[in-house]
Amino acid sequence: MNRREAISSVALLLGGTIIGAEAFLSGCKNKAAGEISFSPSDVSYLNEIAETILPTTSTPGAKEAKVGEFMTAIVKDCYEAKDQTIFMDGMSKLDEASKKKSGKSFMDSTPEQRHDLLVDLDKEAKEYQKSKKKEDPNHYFRMMKELTLWGYFTSEIGATKALRYVAVPGKYEGCIPYKKGDKAWAT
């Protein structure tokens, strides 16, 4: 199974709840693909956002898994034009929120300031989601967070370092003892 098939499986398991999943399941053949572009500094910026969401601990973080590159590929190739615009505008809004909160750009902020900002944005996104109507646009931070989790846990690093992974599954075992603190299975 290659990465694309794995991500399709994950999207199906989640019931297509990830923004852009329906496009991905149909092969990411977005007519708007190629109309937006991300600079290397945009990728670095997204890596820093992702690293703040999933930092390096005893396992590698989102930056090492190159989640910023993953996000740009999915947004460019799989998102509809309206969601692409929300995501791109959201990158600016996040930086503006950082300047308003700490007086510094996100990239110049300390890890603690970044964390506090993203906690606030996550609360804002959750509140927005509660009252969101179907026709309302998606919240940019929810998009970033979903892509971070999707990109990390479907990457080689996420699947093999953060989750338990068996490259070639053996026989089916329906009852496996669980020890408190065990990692979830990637396969």
Image (tube, rainbow, N blue to C red):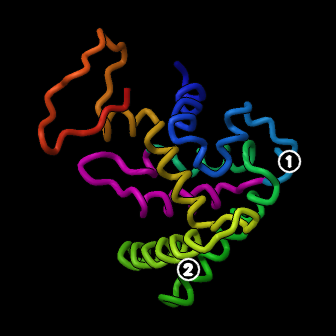
Q: Is residue 38 magenta?
A: yes
Q: Which residue is mark 1?
A: 32
The crowding category of the residue bearing disc 1, from other C-alpha atoms within 10 Å (few below 14, some 14 to 19, many at least 20), is some
Residue 136 within the segment the image draws in magenta? no
Q: Position of residue 86 (x, y in %)?
A: 73, 65
Give residue 18's position: percent from left, percent from top.
59, 49
User: Mark 2: which amino acid?
Assistant: Ser
Q: Earlier in the sequence, mark 1 or mark 2?
A: 1
Quarter of the C terminus within the rendering = top left
Task: Tell me which residue sits at (53%, 77%) in the image.
Answer: 124
Mark 1 secondary-structure assignment? loop
Q: Is residue 174 above or below residue 65?
A: above
Front position in the image: 59 or 187: 187
Image coords of residue 159 (percent x, y): 38, 34
- Give the magenta-colored segment's residue range: 37-64
Closer to the eye: label 1 or 2? 1
Q: Residues within 10 Å of mark 2 (few under 14, many from 20)?
A: some
* Quarter holding residue 114: bottom left
- Residue 106 location (% of width, % of height): 53, 75
The residue that appears at 34% across and 46% down in the rendered structure is: 60
* Residue matched to label 2: 105
Secondary structure of the residue carrying numbered label 2: loop
Point 48% across, 58% down: residue: 50
Distance from Cα at disc 1 to Cα at disc 2: 30 Å
Of residues 49 and 86, the one nearer the viewer is: 86
Q: Amino acid at mark 1?
A: Ala
> Residue 11's image quarter?
top right
